[in-house]
């Protein structure tokens, strides 16, 4: 694809190169000259030459072929320049210029014009409003990052939606021993977007891991598809900016209010097997170390010469949901032959403050046989030898290059050289225990989630049910829809007269429930629109009258009364579960499954899943609190039935894009039954 | 107290000074010589002189007065040396030697002998098994940390239970711009303990903040008392090692199983107003910056030249429970006069990528008037001037020294000098947004918790009720105790015959509940020992027979049957709450208040409080999920009544130290009533 051409052009033209050293157009040209060996052209109608290169009035005047044009001129001239590029048969352009959708209405109009042109055009574009692109091999720096910034070659590709963050991170990366394969400032992504770039980097042999800073996405589905394919090949790490949990106030449904803005992103990234981080230091560590080892178990071994260091590392391991590996008897016995009597042979393996490099070696040789991710802690103490210990670690790595081996060298100047020795040889070394644990946790997540299976999902028989309603549907009208989808619902019916009421209760029996049904109220309880536990004819008559009164008082035009069986009748030890659907504007339908009933609002014990749920996610769901609540009352087949509901609701929302939210709350779950007792469909 | 003498001795004797430069006794002497201006004596029977100082055969041979003896000799000779010190009227000793309780049985015996001697002795001791003590002013380094380690003078006192961690942190501190007032390795704390040292440091004018690394405490009450007094005067920061949540398997009660090992520590530290951190990098940041500003509001202002930086910082602020300050209209209008049109005037205030130092100044001058903790973010961009921006920040600090002003300089070499400029002038600067947010969160916690009030606690009238039972008490026998304490319990009685049953139900009415009462079973439900919802005489007779059958089948000798009113009778919209007591081995009774009933095990939505509950904690409790569940069903006075139960149970457990755990679960809460429906007291 043309992105290859952008990264590896045979010739570049800088449109808007500048003689003023403080201008963007000057820095770009300087960076290209410092890094690039192909042909460089300069376009600036007001200059004869810039930085020693002849300047053309227009790109049209260049006779040679131009592969990539870098456009850094005022926003209102960009489209014209781009049209010239097309005439000149330039393959691709990087539009540095700002002044597009990021500045509001006027810019949005400009960006739409740009997009309209690009739709018909052969030319491919990065930007506008970006910093540019750097390829480290073959080298070409087409950005305006400070030309003094030292950038090292490595195997991490970095894509950023924030230019400012990109330049700050690149500025700091070298000192953090991070090398890059590609650095891409994506800007407004008017043409080439994150997914396109991921597709490219997935196949790029010089890229071993992909790191993204993202604030928002336009086409969630496309992104997710690319992300899933990429994680099958290499780790992808994402820092999502804008994780605030403010919910849209327009959302009426309970499920909607439980789903925060970030929820869908989190779910989608997780489902695609990407590692998510929440702060910049973690981002740096993953940039440096994500591609170094495969971590396929969550059982970690710790070897330490400092009790306190082992204790703190164990704390982090517990808190991050990893496990300390059990040391089997044979290994403990082997260790005991090598170590002083006061050593702790169980994990963390404490080889004491006076541990020599030899003692580290003997211990590590035994421990390495366990093939578990291993954290080696070194703390400078009396007579300890940091450099020699580092060499022991490196020797082990050479002998067992696939053993995930993470070192923590506590301390400062006393251990600095040892740290550098290992880092320069490509081994991950950290100053603090939490860093090593975060990396192991992230990599274990990746290697256990990068290739999900969907057997359960595929097994579900889904009925295509269309819902063309333009108004919210509650009560019986919603119940009928859910029945069609294949969800068990409580017996119920509309009752418009006293005689219908009597006929109904003959079928349904006592205790029963009467509810007001009105499209204009979602929360019937609040106005006294629900009467439960009706035990006999006398109570039933009274309830019917009371509800008619409520309808009158609240002026609920068109409201009706509905009669339901008591869904909890004859059910011992049942629990109330909620299942809901929420349409995320970027990623589409997501499904909530949580604890329903009276505590639902206060506790918000709820898990979200994507409708295309993986077998691994189903297993994880079972181990959550929600899963435990369900399993405390129901059998495995009922849990499986609820998973079926998740899939069915998801498909229903995929087929009917007018539906915004769905609430099934409560679903009465016990033994081998799951029955929805209240139902809502929101389209507004 | 004598601890002053230890920190500021007029003369020191090193018992076990060594000529071998690889020995501890050599490093100690070297450190003293490098730092100390008082008289130094050396004791070593096998040397004439060490490091140029005359060596004595015994401390007894020294004619001059000796204030402090540092003992670094084999463990089995320590007591003898200490006895000599006493004869010599040495005020205090630091016992470096290891080989005491940390090595097991033999060492434990040795430590007990040491303690027995110290009990009768006038001499005060730090250690054994410690690294020693450093005072920075007047300077004296009485440790064996590497003599090449650079240690800076400052205002942070550091106490560590781990020697290895202490030396690693001290080694790294200088590079992290941390200066110390005192550094204390506490070792086994056979005499002077953490509380004693905190008492001293609280009054020490050279110490502005106190940092502790703790793995465990022996006397929790004493520690807590000292901690509470200290936090009234200066911030105390604690990293607790060993936070694993493994619960003691011996605990039978539900409350007991909810309380992890760390829970009591966490509660106690929080109640005392200490800042807790969980990793070493946070510890470093608090060491450096805890005493710099008072943070008295959780509303933070962010000023940034990088959108992405503002977004990430906002995320951390939300995730850590802080708030972004609202920018009022007048301020926004003032800002709008100074800033370009595209700026974001609302928090985060984005002054755009081309922000000059002047623009920072104009913005900060306006923002400073809000008197809110302020985070200034600088990201190196085209034409930005880091050093000049740093100077603007420093000028503001000089003008408004009390404004909590935190800077984040993103990037590497481009901003390093600017960072150093501010750090050297005592201003907190961070590389990453999460660091600034963690500091603000910690300091806000401190300034809002350091002086709790106990009005509600004091108002509670507590009845002293003694419980001398040596067996667990369940059912009616427990109910009677709780009634005496002043807790509302459901009506109930023992029924040993059919006629008692009839008489009982005449009083209590239907529906009612029958339960088996046996001291040998805590969980009656599991064997079918509870029958609820009994509606009439027929069901009652059947239930009575069934339970007698259960007693027979399970061979429950001495078991009886109890009749209870249905506590949920006539209560609409009630919730089930649990209140329990658990005795922590270090800190004593702690009280759990949580969601009870069927979900209690799976959801574990529970808050722990100390029985001496502060008014602030009560307010916080109301805002937790548990508080919200209670308030969803009950009135404020009922919430207050439950707080009364907390205080009463706490007092009851304080008075009766044989009680290990208490469960009141469920308590039926609705409107203005709270009634305990099941009751257990565990002593075993």
Image (cartoon, coloured by chain):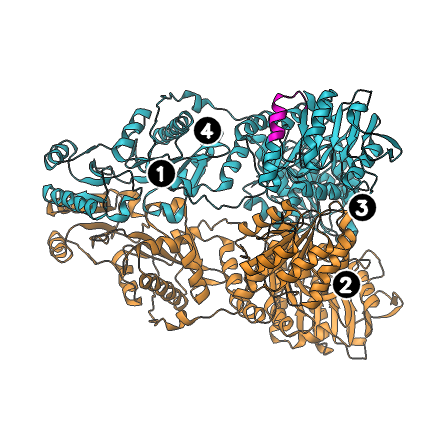
Chain colours: A orange, B cyan
Graded by Cα atoms within 10 Å as few (under 14), some (14 to 19) or many (20 or more), the crowding at tag 3 reads some
- Residue position for label 4: B613
Q: Are marks 2 and 3 on the same chain?
A: no
The reply to whether callout 1 and callout 3 are in contact (CB within 8 Å) is no
- Residue position for label 1: B578
> B565 above or below B93?
below
The answer to which of marks 3 and 4 sits earlier in the sequence is: 3
Graded by Cα atoms within 10 Å as few (under 14), some (14 to 19) or many (20 or more), the crowding at tag 4 reads many
> B568 above or below A209?
above
User: In the image, what residue occupies the spot 20% across and 48% down?
Assistant: B553
The answer to which of marks 1 and 3 sits earlier in the sequence is: 3
Q: Is residue A176 visible?
A: no
Q: What kind of element bears circle 1?
A: strand
| Spot occupied by residue B447 in the image (x, y as percentages of width and height) | 59, 30
- Residue position for label 2: A152
Q: What kind of element bears circle 4?
A: loop
- Residue position for label 3: B417
- Tell whether position B121 is magenta: yes
User: Horizontal placement of B291 versus A530: left or right?
Assistant: right
Q: Which numbered dot is residue B636? A: none
Q: Are marks 4 and 2 on the same chain?
A: no
The one of B457 and B540 positioned closer to us in this rendering: B540
Give the foreground label among 4 and 2: 4
Marks 2 and 3 sit apart, C-alpha to C-alpha, by 22 Å
Region in magenta: B113-123
| Spot occupied by residue B374 in the image (x, y as percentages of width and height) | 65, 38
Marks 1 and 4 sit apart, C-alpha to C-alpha, by 17 Å
Q: What kind of element bears circle 2?
A: strand
Marks 1 and 2 sit apart, C-alpha to C-alpha, by 59 Å
Give the foreground label among 1 and 3: 1
């Amino acid at each position: 694809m043309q992105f290859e051409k952008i990264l590896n052009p045979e010739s570049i033209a800088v449109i808007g190169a500048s003689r003023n050293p403080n201008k963007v157009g000057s820095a770009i040209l300087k960076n290209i000259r410092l890094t690039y060996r192909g042909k460089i052209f300069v376009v600036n109608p007001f200059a004869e030459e810039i930085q020693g290169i002849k300047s053309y009035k227009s790109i049209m005047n260049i006779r040679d072929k131009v592969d990539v044009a870098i456009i850094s001129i005022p926003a209102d001239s960009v489209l014209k320049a781009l049209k010239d590029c097309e005439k000149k048969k330039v393959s691709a352009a990087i539009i540095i210029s700002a002044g597009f959708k990021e500045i509001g209405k006027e810019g949005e109009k400009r960006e739409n014009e740009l997009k309209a042109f690009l739709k018909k055009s052969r030319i491919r574009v990065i930007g506008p409003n970006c910093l540019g692109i750097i390829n480290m091999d073959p080298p070409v720096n087409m950005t305006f990052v400070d030309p003094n910034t030292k950038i090292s070659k490595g195997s991490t590709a970095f894509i950023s939606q924030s230019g400012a963050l990109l330049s700050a991170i690149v500025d700091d990366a070298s000192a953090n021993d991070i090398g890059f394969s590609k650095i891409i400032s994506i800007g407004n992504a008017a043409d080439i977007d994150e997914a396109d770039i991921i597709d490219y980097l997935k196949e790029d042999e010089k890229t071993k891991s992909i790191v993204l800073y993202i604030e928002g996405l336009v086409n969630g589905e496309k992104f997710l598809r690319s992300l899933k394919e990429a994680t099958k090949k290499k780790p992808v790490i994402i820092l999502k900016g804008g994780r605030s949990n403010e919910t849209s106030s327009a959302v009426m449904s309970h499920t909607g209010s439980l789903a925060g803005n970030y929820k869908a992103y989190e779910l989608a990234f997780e489902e695609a097997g990407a590692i998510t981080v929440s702060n910049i230091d973690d981002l740096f560590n993953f940039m440096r170390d994500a591609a170094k080892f495969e971590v396929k178990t969550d059982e970690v071994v710790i070897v330490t010469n400092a009790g306190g260091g082992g204790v703190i590392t164990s704390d982090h391991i517990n808190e991050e949901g990893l496990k300390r590996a059990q040391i089997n008897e044979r290994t403990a016995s082997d260790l005991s032959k090598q170590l002083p009597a006061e050593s702790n042979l169980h994990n963390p393996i404490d080889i004491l403050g006076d541990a020599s490099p030899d003692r580290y070696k003997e211990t590590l040789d035994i421990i390495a046989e366990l093939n578990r991710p291993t954290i080696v802690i070194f703390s400078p103490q009396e007579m300890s030898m940091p450099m020699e210990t580092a060499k022991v670690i490196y020797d082990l790595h050479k002998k067992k290059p696939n053993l995930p081996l993470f070192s923590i060298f506590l301390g400062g100047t006393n251990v600095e050289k040892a740290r550098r020795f290992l880092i320069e040889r490509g081994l991950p070394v950290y100053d603090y225990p939490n860093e090593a644990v975060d990396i192991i946790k992230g990599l274990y997540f990746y290697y256990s989630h990068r290739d999900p299976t969907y057997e359960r999902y595929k097994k579900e028989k889904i009925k295509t049910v269309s819902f063309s309603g333009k108004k919210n549907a509650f009560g019986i009208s919603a119940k009928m829809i859910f029945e069609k989808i294949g969800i068990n619902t409580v017996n119920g019916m509309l009752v418009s007269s006293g005689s219908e009421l009597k006929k109904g209760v003959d079928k349904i029996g006592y205790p029963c429930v009467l509810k007001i049904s009105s499209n204009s109220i979602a929360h019937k309880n609040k106005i006294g629109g629900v009467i439960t536990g009706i035990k006999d004819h006398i109570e039933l008559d009274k309830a019917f009258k009371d509800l008619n009164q409520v309808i009158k008082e609240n002026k609920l035009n068109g409201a009706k009364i509905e009669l339901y069986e008591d869904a909890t009748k004859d059910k011992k030890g049942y629990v109330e579960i909620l299942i809901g659907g929420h349409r995320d504007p970027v990623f589409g339908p997501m499904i909530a499954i949580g604890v329903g009933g009276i505590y639902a609002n206060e506790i918000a014990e709820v898990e979200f899943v994507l409708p295309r749920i993986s077998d691994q996610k189903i297993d994880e769901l079972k181990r959550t609190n929600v899963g435990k609540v369900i399993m405390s009352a129901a059998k495995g087949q009922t849990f499986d039935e609820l998973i079926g509901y998740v899939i069915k609701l998801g498909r229903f929302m995929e087929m009917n894009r007018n539906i915004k939210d769905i609430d099934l709350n409560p679903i009465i779950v016990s033994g081998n039954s799951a029955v929805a007792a209240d139902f809502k469909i929101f389209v507004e």
